[in-house]
Image: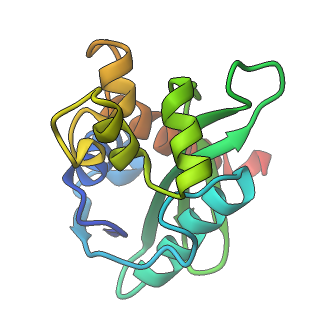
Amino acid sequence: MKINVASKNMVKVDAVKETVREYPLFKGVEISFAETASGVSEQPKSLEETVQGAVNRAEAAFKDCDYSIGIESGLMNVPHTKTGSMDFCACSIYDGKEHSIGLSCAFEFPKKVTEMIHEQGITANDAFYNVGLTTNKKIGSAEGAIGILTKGRVTRNDYTKQAVQMALIHLENKNLY
């Protein structure tokens, strides 16, 4: 069995590798990875756009494999929050016919970060750097914003794994869906 991960971001690739090791369905699986376009903005700002980015990536990576996996992080509007939005990760597992979608936990960025993303149209990476919360211009390929805000208690790898695990519910329980 072969899985193509639609990313060269090793945090995403490692999250997939670590997760599928826990599933008998994927015993002996070969995992490859390649960068694909999301087809959405560099910083998705809605649930719909973020999920669509994951779907687009999964479809683009479906070549000579049994499953392809697209992962996209973005913001979504959430009522009663301090900033009006929360960041989350979406995963799409594609078998050539159907998508299995999973989402991670969600959390708020600091107000200044959220304002910069919406007002200046910049990415979370750039906003966290510009606000001075990190010296790493590529936090999405490291601990992630969630790692910074939780002081390492939850990392980008952790929340990416959550999204993959939630999408895998469909594959482990096909008779229910």
Give residue 16's position: percent from left, percent from top. 33, 49
> As drawn, which residue projects farthest toward the left?
135
Q: Is residue 51 above or below residue 95?
A: above
**On the picture, is 62 further left or further right than 86?**
left
Residue 22 in view, yes or no: no
Q: Is residue 104 above or below residue 1?
A: above
Give residue 42's position: percent from left, percent from top. 47, 65
Quadrant that contains the N terminus: bottom left
Q: Residue at x 82, y 19 (%)?
A: 80
Residue 113 in view, yes or no: yes
Q: Quadrant of residue 161?
A: top left
> As drawn, which residue projects farthest toward the right?
79
Q: How many marks?
A: 0
Q: Residue at x 43, y 32 (%)?
A: 159
Give residue 69's position: percent from left, percent from top. 44, 63
**On the picture, is 83 further left or further right than 10?**
right
Q: Quadrant of residue 63?
A: bottom left
Give residue 86's position: percent from left, percent from top. 63, 32
Q: Residue at x 51, y 24 (%)?
A: 110
Between 165 and 70, which is closer to the camera in this rendering? 70
Q: Residue at x 21, y 47 (%)?
A: 137
Q: Is residue 37 above or below residue 156?
A: below
Q: Quadrant of residue 18?
A: top left
Between 141 and 157, which is closer to the camera in this rendering? 141
